Each structure stands twice: as C-alpha cells, then as structure tokens.
Image (cartoon, rainbow, N blue to C red):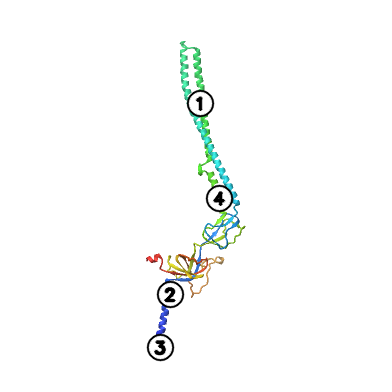
Amino acid sequence: MKKTRKYILTATIVIVAAGAVVLKYLSFKRKPWTRDGQVSANVVEITPRVSGPIVKLSINNNQFVKAGDLLFTIDPRTFKAAHDQAKAEYDITIDNYRSQEKKIQEANAQVEVSQKQILQAQSTIKEIESEIEKNKAEYKRQKQLLPQKATSQRSLDKAKANYEISLEKHKGAVASLAQAKASLVQAKAALAQQRAKLGKKGHGNANIRKAKAALEQAELNLEFTEVRASVDGYVTNLNLRPGSHAVANQPVLALVDINSYWVYGFFKETSIANISTGDKATVTLMGHPDEPLDGYVESIGWGIAQQDGSTGENLLINVSPTFEWIRLAQRIPVIVRFDEIPKGVKLRMGTTASVQVNTGTSDSEAKK
C-alpha cells in the first residue's frame, strides 16, 4: 500500500513538473522574452558649415539642449567682411542696372526723334512736290504766254527761278530724309546694343541674380558662424574649447536625440516566428528594474552581419570552425518603441534591458 502511494506521489510530481514545463514553454512561445536588450537612440553629429576658430562655447559636456539653442560661435569677422563686400557688389550691380535702364530710355528717345524726323522729312517732301508741280505749271504757262506778248520776260524768269528753287529744295528734303533714315538705323542699333548690355529686366537679370546669390551666400555663411542644436537632446563627448578650430563639414560633437529612443531586443531566431509588427511589448531596464515600460514592436530585422562567407586574408573566404552537435541560434534584432516614458526613468543610450513581447496583440492580429 505504501509503495502504491509512493508511486502515485512520484507520478503526480512528475506530471506536475512536466505540466509546468509545458506551460512555461507555451508561455514562452506566446510571450517570447530576452535579456539581450539594449537602449538605442539617434545620434546627431553636429557639423559646422564654415571653418574658423571658436570664440564662444555656450554648452557643457552632457548638457541638455533644445532645438535651436546656441552651441558655439565661430569667429564671424571674416564672414562679416565678406558679407559687407557682397552687399556693396550687389548695390553696385543695382546702380549699374538702373544706369543702363536710363541709357536704354535715352536710346529709345533717340529712336523716337529719328522717327519723327523721318515723318517730318516725308511731309516736307510732299509739300515741296506739290510746290514743284505748281511752279512747273506756272513756268510752262509763262513760256506759252511770252510769244503771245501776254507776259514779260521778267515774269518768265521769275517762274523759272521758282521752279528751279523748288527742285533744289526737293533735293535737300530727300537728303534730309535719307539722313533721318540713317539716324534711325543708328539709333535702333544703339538701342539694341544697350538692351543687350542690360539683359533681362527686373529680378530675372543675370547680373542681379548673380550678385543677389553671392549676397545670400555671404548672409548664410555669416549665419552659419552660430552653430545651433538641430534636435532636443544631450551633448555628449564634448572636446571643444574656445580657440579650437572648427573645420567645415567635419563633425565636432554629438547630440543624443531624446525624442528618438528605442530598444533593440535581440531574440533567438527560433523565437520570432510569432512576433508581428505592432505587438505590445514590456521593457525592463536594468537600471530601473521596478519600473517596466510599455511599448510596441515597430519592426523586425531582416538581416544580420555574418563572419562566415566574408573575405579574409589573401582574399580567401572566412569560415569559422563549428561543433557538429551544437548549433547556436542567431539573434535577430526587434525594434521596440515606447508608448510613454515615466518621468522618473532616464534612458541612456547603450544601457541594458530585458524585452518581452505579447504576441497576437497587434491590430492586424486582432482583426484576424
């Protein structure tokens, strides 16, 4: 009887233990968990746009700054001088443009004067031609009357003189017309030349656009002497001092963006089958073990770097030795974003965290 009870007790313990193992396994499959988690964030490299010595440092190492806060100032005197010169060049260009416009107006006025002279000469020629016809008719009439003694030689000579004078006046008027036409051609050529020198009118003028672009670039360079924070974050690894020389397009310090924190949960490849984007997750920071953070799976990695297959020494392929009876599961990164971070929790990039994912809780899974 005692042996029977002993067997029953032993069987019960084994069954309970096996059940516990099964439940734990099922729980792990439904809520995969890893201690291999790490806090990460976007690191913004602060890079000056111009070169020069730093004359003012407005920050300390590990200081919190807001977007737009002044970080440091590069000596602005060289860029101020360049800006003043560009402004002067722009003003000169505007003055030259206006002067050229006046020359065009003068050339245009000369064209109008020449056109009026042509019209005047043409009108005069018509009047003289009418006068010529009249004087010619009178001269002809006087020649017909003289044999009949109906006029005098003096009247005939006078009619002849008037006729010849009108012919000479006609020649002069024709010459004036030709000169007016020549003047018009010259005036139009001068107008075209002045317009070519001016180019397009207004803000489309090439010289104005060039001078304006140079001025805007000088203004930007002067503005770039004040280097400001682009995001809210913490200054880190600050090695600058007043007098340090900043080089354009070379990073000089880093900002950890506080609005970009996430956690990498490195899950075994055997544990990610049921994880979906949008699944709820719980993150426990090693530095705050009693304050778990709620989050959600933002994405799951599609690739990790492998040493096997890479190029090694002498351009030969790298192959690491393995034990045939042991196969280690690879770790796949799962990115977890936070719904909200409690005020008392300070996230620091690179710190350790544990991550548990509650599978089947994404919106897409809920709809199924």
Q: Contact, CB < 8 Å: mark 4 with mark 3?
A: no
Q: x and y percent of residue 165 in the render?
A: 51, 20
> In the rendering, which numbered label is found on residue 219?
4
Q: If you read the primary sequence from the N terminus, does the residue marked by circle 4 or circle 2 appear first? A: 2
Residue 127 in view of the camera: yes
Residue at the spot 46% in from the left edge and 22% down from the top edge: 130
Query: Marks 1 and 2, Cα distance to the nearest angstrom?
Result: 117 Å
In this rendering, is residue 158 above or below 68? above
Q: Amino acid at mark 4?
A: Glu
- Residue found at the very far right of the displayed protein: 243
Earlier residue among tags 1 and 2: 2
Above or below residue 117? Residue 11 is: below
- Give, as a three-letter code, the residue at label 2: Tyr
Query: Eyeballing the image, is 236 above or below 20?
Result: above
Front tag of 4 and 2? 4
- For mark 2, what is the residue? 25
Residue carrying label 1:
174
For the point 54% across and 46% down, the residue is 212
Q: Residues within 10 Å of mark 3 (few under 14, many from 20)?
A: few
Q: At 49% across and 27% down in the image, what residue appears?
A: 120
Mark 2 to mark 3 CA distance (whole Å): 33 Å
Left or right of residue 82, residue 36 in this image? left
Q: Residue at x 40, y 85 (%)?
A: 7
Residue that label 3 marks? 3
